[in-house]
Amino acid sequence: MPFYKVIKFCCFFFLWFNSAFSQNYPVKNYTAANELPNNAVRSLLVDSNNVLWIGTENGVVKKENDDFKYFFEEDGLALNSCWAIAEDSNKNLWFGSYGAGISIFNGRDFKVISGIDGLVHNEITSLFSRGNKMFVGTSDGISVVDINSFKVHSLKYSAGNELFRIQDFFIYQNQVYVASYISGVFKISFENDRPILVRVNDKVPIYSVLVEKDSIYSSNKGFFSKNSLAEFVDKGNSDSEKRLGTSIIWNYIKTSDNRIFAGAWGIYDTNGGIFEIKDNKMISRASQFDIPSREVLCLAYNPTFERLYVGTKDAGLFEVVLDPQIKFNEIDGINVLGFARTENSSAVLLSDGISLKAGSNEKKISLQQLKKWQENYVRKTKLPLPRHEDHFYELDYSTKAENIGFYDIKVFGNVFWVNTNIGIFAINNSGELLRYLPVHSEEINFTPTGKLIETNPYGGVRIYNDLDSFSYTSFHPEDPSTPTMVVNSLQKNDKTYFLSVFSGLYVWENDKFKSYVVDDSWEEKKLRHMTTLGEDLAVSSEFGDVFILKDDPEFKLLQKIPRANIQGNTISFLKEYRGNLIVGTEKGLTLFKDDRKIFLDEEQGLKQPLHGAEVNGDHLNIGSNNGYYSLDLKSLFKECNLVEDLEIKEIFINNNELLSQQRSEQEELELAHNQNTVLLRFGTNSHPFPNKLKYQYKLNEKDNWSLPTDKPEIFLPFLTPNDYEITVRVLDQSTGLSYTQPLLRLSILQPFWKTWWFFLLILCAILLVVFSVYKIQIRQNKRFEAQKRIIQKRFEETKMEALLAQMNPHFIFNAMNSIQNYILDSDIDNANLFLGDFAKLIRLNLDHCTRPTILLIEEIEYLQSYTRVENTRFNNAVKVIFDIDKELDVYEVEIPTMLLQTFVENVFVHAFPNNIEDPTLEISFKLLPGDILECKIKDNGVGFQADTSNKLHNSKGIKLVKERLTLLGYDLEKTVRISAVKGKGTTLVLRLQV
């Protein structure tokens, strides 16, 4: 049995009322006026997930936790008329239509199999799943369909002009048998995986069958029969077969506790309905199940939740709770108002009297008996009757028996005390009147010593010292300590408490009354109900709050349960069960146990109004109209979580549904930044009381839970880009437990302009722009520098030309001096030779001076000509030597024009005075590593010292050469090196880049 079911009572509380009390079952009716598309329900199935499938004449309905989903032809169904439903081992649903074949549903799509695919007939009458085969019964034959390949094998039996109509299937000795309408019973065998039809008997007609252990029930026209299964298969009809029942049974269902229910429709008779087959009899359950229809076509049973589903032809679907948490025991036309119990007897306060039971003795005290007792007392008493003038709440002695009203029933001293609008009655266990008091009081109780306390709404309180003599002590309402407007009371240990609807809490202790409001112990005034709660007290206010109080040894308010935590606004009663609080309201019953809060209402079968209540052991009995409710508290307080799983049903993104194929198996969803409005619809596993479920969610672990809602959906508008792990908590009010499960991991992506890669791209773009600008600037600078160099070069060339122009007069001046010396010496021949060489030298000079650079060979030839001219002045006394490196290509290397002539000229001018013997001039050219041309001019002349002024350093020609080298970009310190030793000559080294 399911863990949440109510355990059967070991001892039924009011056993003596078995003949009058009948248990009613909670029933729901679904019709075309609300949940169904049509009132004609042709087929039912509870699948492996406890989901109910309903086949009607106008579509298929899926009922899951009171959520209805509809399927029609436009959704893929072969035909809206559905006469058979089955589930195969692959968890696919098969819907048999009456006219268009089979529709196979995998949870997303439909696949249709009809006569075109080999189906024997398109009118489906029954479906039966076995292994990897689906057996299809039709109006004219059988088809066997492979559930994996959907290959169809069809079987037909020749029955003359009659159709081979299949009504039902059953299993015997691990083989499938077929019950037909008018063609008999057949066995389906397989040869080489092909089905073969074998007729085993000719029992006709058959409308439906049910195998129960070794027996089989089969229905016929207007009766059913029960046979041995072996005998039925072998012979069909038995000689000992009895006709049982009175109607045509179209469907049987067997429950887990071996109860057999039958759905019947007499076609042309009105003897159909819902029946239970018990002791081979059809016992109508129409009244108990509140199913008025006489045309029951199909049944289904949910063993997990103990639900019986009844499909009718004219009144829709009925859902019956077979083993309810709350059992209602009906007493037709009589209201149950209260309960009381002594050590060895019990009493029930009814609207028409008082029922008593003591041992095996049962007795009911009627209203007429109560009235008779009153009349006898009034007639015989010698004591004056209480009057309004004496501040009594006066009785109306003319009240008729049928107008007697009960206020309460209490037990004190093993006696039942009943206060009514015609007086107070003290009744013993045997139902005998022990005492009658002509006192009208809506609330009575007793002191710890056993004295009766009578409360009067307006006249104060009386405590009776002697009931025989009607002696009492009055406590006037003017005294602030006297209880007034008392609505409830409770005797606990050595204290008797009273609640006032206007003045708060009072107590009788140590022979006096005390007001908790007056002595400032507790200021709450408007109170209504109270009960013990272990060693403490539970008190409810007029407005629905409940207070837990401790009054021993000192008063202390322990806890306040606000009305928001209690379902309902008006509290009907408070009761205690093993230290746990039970609160009855106009909406239902709330049970508090530790941190659990269980709520029961009409969904579990608890209907209003709720009158008096009593906790008897592990059971709670609640009086109501036309009967009373019984609850197994021990079972209700079990910690059994009915919610075990959550599943996403639908996802909408920006109001567009996300198909299941688009979702990942890990329930992880990644959305763009503009897909940020999400609606999630989810559901739990099948639950017996889905309306008791409340849902909360949070988007991340550190967030707070949302407010509870009735709808299993989450609407998240305008989500900001982030990662979310949506967690759902289900609060199950039927058990007081909760279930928490992560539902979906959701990522809303940042817009591309906020992503790291976009920032990186922008950074790269900025860097690229900066780099491009830099490169452009560099190129512009290079172009500028190039232009500047061109201009500079041209400037240098112009300046060098100017320098050369200055050097030419300098050279000419020296040459003219030499010619002048020849003339003065009258050396005409040498003068002529000198003039010839000088003329040639002038031509070379004119040719070279317009060029910034010349070839090294041209420089050497020029220097050779120049030295000959100069040596003529020295009568060729100076030995001139040219030394050229063999690895040096003088025809490729270029050097600045007339760069060396000035240094050579200085040698002839300054180095060789007349006292120099064997004057020698060496001019050499050598190629050094790094393409460096070393030009060396060495003489053995007079030399110079560093501390003396030397004309070589002051020569204007040398300055011009150095200025040219500077303009050409040479470092003079590294390019020009001059060394001289006095009396030994001078060496000049010039290193040029070639």
Image (cartoon, rainbow, N blue to C red):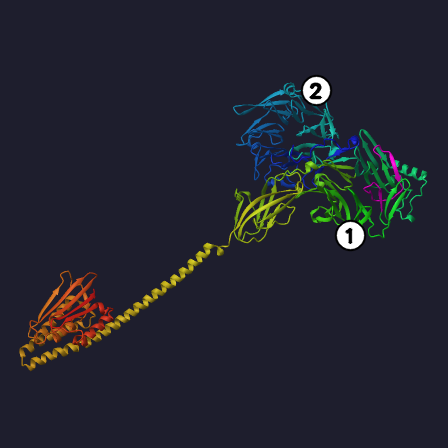
Please tell me the numbered disc located at residue 517.
Answer: 1
Per the image, is 437 magenta? yes
Element assignment for label 1: loop
Within 10 angstroms of label 1, few (less than 14), some, or many (20 or more) residues? some
Element assignment for label 2: loop
Picture coordinates of residue 652 (x, y %)? 58, 48
Q: Is residue 119 above or below residue 731?
A: above
Which residue occupies 93% across, 41% down? 383
Q: Nearer the viewer, residue 623 or 803?
A: 623
Q: Nearer the viewer, residue 737 or 511?
A: 511
Asked if residue 148 lies left or right of residue 202, the reply is left
Point out the residue furthest to the top here: 239
Tell me if label 1 and label 2 are in contact, CB under 8 Å: no
Asked if residue 680 lies left or right of residue 494, the reply is left
Please tell me the numbered disc located at residue 241.
Answer: 2
User: Which of pointers 1 and 2 lies earlier in the amino acid sequence?
Assistant: 2
Does the image show residue 317?
no
Does the image show residue 852?
yes
Picture coordinates of residue 547 (x, y %)? 73, 48
Q: Is residue 798 above or below residue 888?
A: below
Per the image, is 387 magenta? no
The amino acid type, in three-letter code, at marker 2 is Glu
Q: Which residues are magenta?
A: 428-455
